[in-house]
Amino acid sequence: MNERPVVGISLGDVSGIGPEVTASALSRPKVRQALLPVVFGDGPTLERFPAFKKYTRLTPETLERVTEPTVCVVTELSEKDRVPGKPTRAGGKAQYGYIQAAIEAARAGKVDALCTAPVSKEQISRAGIPFMGHTEVLAEAFGREVMMLMDGPRVRVALATNHVPLVEVSRMLTVERLVGQLQLLSRSLKPVVGRAPRIGVLSFNPHAGEGGLLGREEVEVLTPAIKQARKLRVDAHGPLAADGLFAQVEHFPYDAVLAMYHDQGLIPAKALDFERTVNVTLGLPVPRTSPDHGTAYSLAGTGKASSVPMVEALLKAARLAAR
């Protein structure tokens, strides 16, 4: 019996670097040894890459549990809708279709984990599909409360809020929400670190609010949430001033950090190790990972895009599924 986990891979925007970095990553021996891939994407696009010509070719309707590398053809786009560097509305609709096909396969138990190549929120939205990001789509599809974790070799950073305007962040931060997120983060990381993880909670305002002088969120929301979480045996600490914490990265005092908003968490995570930091969705019944970059239209088709982030995302998905 083949014990490699089956990882469903959505191809992302076919006009971006998703197809080429996926093909390159799946050609690596260490990736081939770690997992069985099922690539959900566009038939003509996949045919551009010699490696995929050796894969079994199926459709979402004929897909079952696989025992060999497989491509699942979701679309047959016209030539004008699959030109590298030139996204189209048809391509926007297609990339959303790959996500949905991969999700359905996961719900049916046909794949053990998901790895999503980069998509364009703009192009999906232009196709008439409301879309804020993979994380939100996955939460709705599986009916779960989820959390985005940027899992890097030097730091792990989770987000209290994801793809929302800054002006809306404060009202979304509630004691109940933060306590639940701290519990989820602690529960998810305990098997990884072998104990209750030590979690640092970043402040929302400059200088952790200066006792309320620079904002009341730390006094009225963050501190009460941390106290409640600690009563529930979550090893949470803070609120911590965000401007100085990551200067300690060589001797980082926390197993993970909970950031209050998107850029507060992603800027240090990407700055510290862009290529090897993996986007992991916590709270789902199956692991989901993604490389920490976008569609990079300017690089698409040039052969210059690095596949290292996709390699790391695929290996992470396989490890999480095996665990």
Image (cartoon, grey):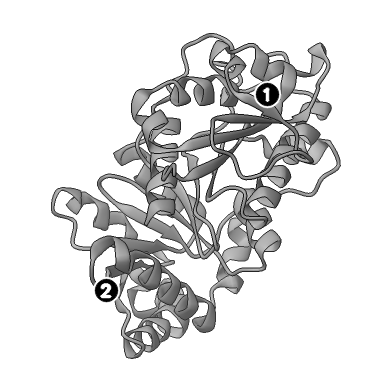
Kindly state the secondary structure of the residue where label 2 is placed: loop
Please give left or right for residue 251 compared with residue 57 in the image. Answer: left
Q: Is residue 164 visible?
A: no
Q: Say above or below: 44 vs 221.
A: above
Q: Quadrant of residue 109?
A: bottom right
Earlier sequence position, callout 2 versus callout 1: 1
Residue at 56%, 70% in the rendered image: 170
Position of residue 147 relative to residue 9, above or below, is: below
Q: Residue furthest front?
A: 1
Crowd rating for badge 2 (residues with CA inside 10 Å; few <14, some 14–19, many 20+): some
Q: Nearer the viewer, residue 37 or 240?
A: 37
Amino acid at pointer 1: Val
Q: Amino acid at mark 2?
A: Ala
From the top left corner, tell me how far across and down residue 235 is, in percent.
Answer: 28, 77
Q: Nearer the viewer, residue 262 or 125?
A: 125
* SS for callout 1: loop
Work out which quarter of the rendered image holds the N terminus and state it: top left
Quadrant location of the C terminus? bottom left
In the rendered view, tell whether residue 248 sits above or below residue 96: below
Residue tagged 1: 14
Label 2 sits on residue = 196
Residue 169 shown left or right of residue 259 in the figure:
right
The local crowd at label 1, few if under 14, some if 14 to 19, many if 20 or more residues have their Cα within 10 Å, is many
